[in-house]
Every structure is written in C-alpha cells, then in structure tokens.
Image: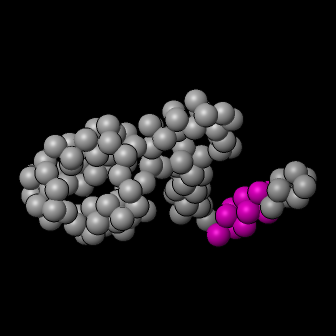
Amino acid sequence: MRLVPRNEQDRKQVRIQTMTQTGEKIRLARKARRMSQDDLADILGTDRETISKYENGVHEMGITTFIQIARALEMNPAELLPEDPEDRRKQNGRDRLNEIAGKLSERDLELVLGLAESMIRNQE
C-alpha cells in the first residue's frame, strides 16, 4: 500500500524524505566510484558545497541536474531514486519464493503452485 500525501504538510515531508534518500544514494554511488565531491562538482560545473547540499537533502535539484548526476556516476537515474517499501517487500517475497522453489521436487512445486493459484482464485 502506497501512502498518498493528504495535505501540504504531508507533501512537504515526502519531498524532504525523497531528497534525503536520493542524496544518500548519490553519496554512496560517488564514494563507490572513489569520486570526491569536488570531482563530481567539476563534472557538473558547480561547486563542492552544492554537491554537499544535494547529498544531505538540503537543496532540491532539478530533473536536469538529477540526470546529469546519474550520468556522471554512470548510473541509470532510476537507481538513485528511493525505493518504495511496498516494492521492496514484494521483491523480498519473490526472492524467498524462488529460493524455496529451487529446493522442491518437480511434483511438490506443482502442488505448491496449484495451492497458490487456488488461494488467488478464492480472493477474487
């Protein structure tokens, strides 16, 4: 279930949280590439202080800057976006199912799949 901001204060909180999480991902990616804030600033044509503000979620960046940062870090921009907790929960579930399925015999796997399909039909 995704939380939808109900009012201006909620929207502001979501924006701040997104900026902070995105900034942290930028910092981690930059450090993983052994790149300093000055290095990234030089590539973007800005200064270290601006990069620090982006990484700390203090300064909101535009979409163009966001894409430029992703390119400078040789990443897909989507990799820098915060993860949705619901998406992470579903992915963990899929990973767990794949692990379990790999341990089952073909016959048992068919039984489990039949049970899962029956459960889905009963929900509808």
- In the rendered image, residue 63, in percent from the top left (x then y), is placed at 40, 61
Looking at the rendered structure, the number of numbered marks drawn on it comes to 0
Q: Which residues are magenta?
A: 106-116
- The residue lying toward the viewer, choosing from 31 and 109, is 31
Indicate whether residue 84 is drawn in magenta: no
**Magenta region, main secondary structure:** helix
- In the rendered image, residue 124, in percent from the top left (x then y), is placed at 90, 55
Q: Is residue 96 visible?
A: no
Q: Is residue 88 left or right of residue 35?
A: right
Q: Is residue 82 left or right of residue 5?
A: left
- The residue lying toward the viewer, choosing from 60 and 118, is 60
- The residue lying toward the viewer, choosing from 116 and 108, is 116
Image quadrant in which you'd find residue 120? bottom right
Image quadrant in which you'd find residue 18? top left
Give the answer, above or below, for where 112 lies relative to 86.
Answer: below
Q: What color scheme is it?
A: one colour
Q: Is residue 6 visible?
A: yes
Image quadrant in which you'd find residue 7? top right
Residue at 57% from the left image edge and 38% from the top image edge:
11
Residue at 73% from the left image edge and 63% from the top image edge:
113
Residue at 19% from the left image edge and 63% from the top image edge:
44
- In the rendered image, residue 101, in percent from the top left (x then y), is placed at 59, 61
The N terminus lies in quadrant? top right
Residue at 27% from the left image edge and 61% from the top image edge:
69
Give the answer, above or below, for where 105 lies relative to 12.
Answer: below
- In the rendered image, residue 60, in percent from the top left (x then y), is placed at 37, 46
